Structures are given as C-alpha cells and as structure tokens.
Amino acid sequence: MKRGNLPVKRSINLAATEEKAVNFKVGIPAIILIILAAFAFGKFAVADRLVAVSRAEAQAAALQTELNAAYDKLNSFGELTEIYAHYTYSGMTKDEISRADRGSAIELLRRIVLPSGQVSSWTLSGNVLTVNIYCDDLRVVNRTVQNIEADDHVNFCTVNTAATTDRNNYGYTDGGVTARITIYLNPNEEVTRP
C-alpha cells in the first residue's frame, strides 16, 4: 500500500455530516416568495371571502327588514278593513249618515260659486259650508246667493260679511267686494242604516 491512499483522520464520527454553507443569494428571495405567497393566500382565500360573506349577511338583513315591514302591512290589513267598514253605510254612526254629501258640496262650489268670482278659501264642517269669495260688486254676491239657495242640496244660505276691498291684493287695480257666505246644506236623508 502506498502512503497516499490511506486516510489521514485518526477518528471518524459516522453520525456527523458535513455542513453546507447557506447561500444568501438564493435563501432570502425564497423566504420573501414564501411570505408573499402566504400573504396572497390569506388575502384572496380568506379575507376576500370574509368580506363577501359579510356583504351577503348585510343584504340578507336588509331583505329581512323589508320582509318584516311587508308582514306588518299585511298584519294591519284587519285595521284597514275595520276603518273602511266604518265608512260604509253599515258602519257609520247616525250623525255621520246625516251629514251632507261631500261630493255634492264640491259640485255646488264648482257650478255656482267659482264662476261668480275668486274663492280664497272654503271649509265644510258637518252640514255647513263656508266660502270666502271675491266678486266685482254686491250684485254678483246677491246673484250668487240666490243661485245657491235655488239648489236642491241647500237648505239655507246667508252672507255673513261683505266689504269693499282694494283689488291690488288679487293683482287688479280696480276695487271689488269680499264676501263670506255660509251655506247650510240639506242632511243626507236618503241614506238609511240597514
């Protein structure tokens, strides 16, 4: 045997292996890539899904609120039916039945009062219709009252006040008359309780 072929080490540890040095040029980019991959996975696979679930839950809550409101309206149908039934002839009180027909009162205003002048206001309480009107002169007020009294729906008509006024308030330059007419309508006697 030649001397160059013999091992130089005098002790051998078979459990120990040679350590390789870490190459930082490869290790650092690999670690950065692993961190970026974990972050991308966390964002797209977890966070975005949680946001989508949260939005879906909010939409479901909004739809549930709308559904509950619709159910409340359906549940109040009985109250609405009772209110409607009260205003049919079978549910009205005797006083309500005896009131003058509101449609006839408005028709009276349209046919007789409005062509006579400008109506500034009117109220209908019970069977009493009160009209504030502006006319050219007292003759128009008198003629209007006579036409009102001739109507079948009217029991009695009176002029409470009549005064000459400046027409500047109505956009005209000459004077006129403001009058307050009280009309007592006939009660609705044709309607009887069943």
Image (cartoon, rainbow, N blue to C red):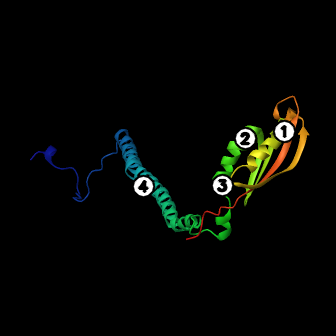
Q: Give whichever of discs 4 and 2 has the lower sequence position.
A: 4
Tag 3: amino acid? Arg
Q: Is 7 on the left or on the right of 53, as rendered? A: left
* Closer to viewer: mark 1 or mark 4: 1
What residue sits 24% from the left and 59% below the top?
A: 13
Q: Give whichever of discs 3 and 1 has the lower sequence position.
A: 3
Q: Nearer the viewer, residue 97 or 57?
A: 97
The residue carrying mark 2 is 114
The residue carrying mark 1 is 139
Q: Give whichever of discs 1 and 4 has the lower sequence position.
A: 4
The residues tagged by marks 1 and 4 sit, at their Cα atoms, a distance apart of 79 Å
The residues tagged by marks 3 and 1 sit, at their Cα atoms, a distance apart of 28 Å
Q: Quadrant of the C terminus?
A: bottom right
Tag 2: amino acid? Leu
* Closer to viewer: mark 3 or mark 1: 1
What residue sits 22% from the left and 55% below the top?
A: 10
Tag 4: amino acid? Val
User: Given contact means CB atoms under 8 Å apart, are the residues at marks 3 and 2 in contact?
Assistant: no
Tag 1: amino acid? Arg
* Closer to viewer: mark 4 or mark 2: 2
Which SS class for mark 3?
Answer: helix
The residues tagged by marks 4 and 2 sit, at their Cα atoms, a distance apart of 64 Å
- The circle drawn on residue 34 is none
Q: Is residue 139 above or below residue 13?
A: above
* Closer to viewer: mark 2 or mark 1: 1
The residue carrying mark 3 is 102
Where in the figure is residue 146, as x and y percent of width and height? 78, 46
Q: Is residue 194 above or below residue 50?
A: below
Near mark 3 (Cα within 10 A), the count class, few <14, some 14-19 or many ≥20, is some
Q: Nearer the viewer, residue 143 or 126?
A: 143
The residue carrying mark 4 is 53
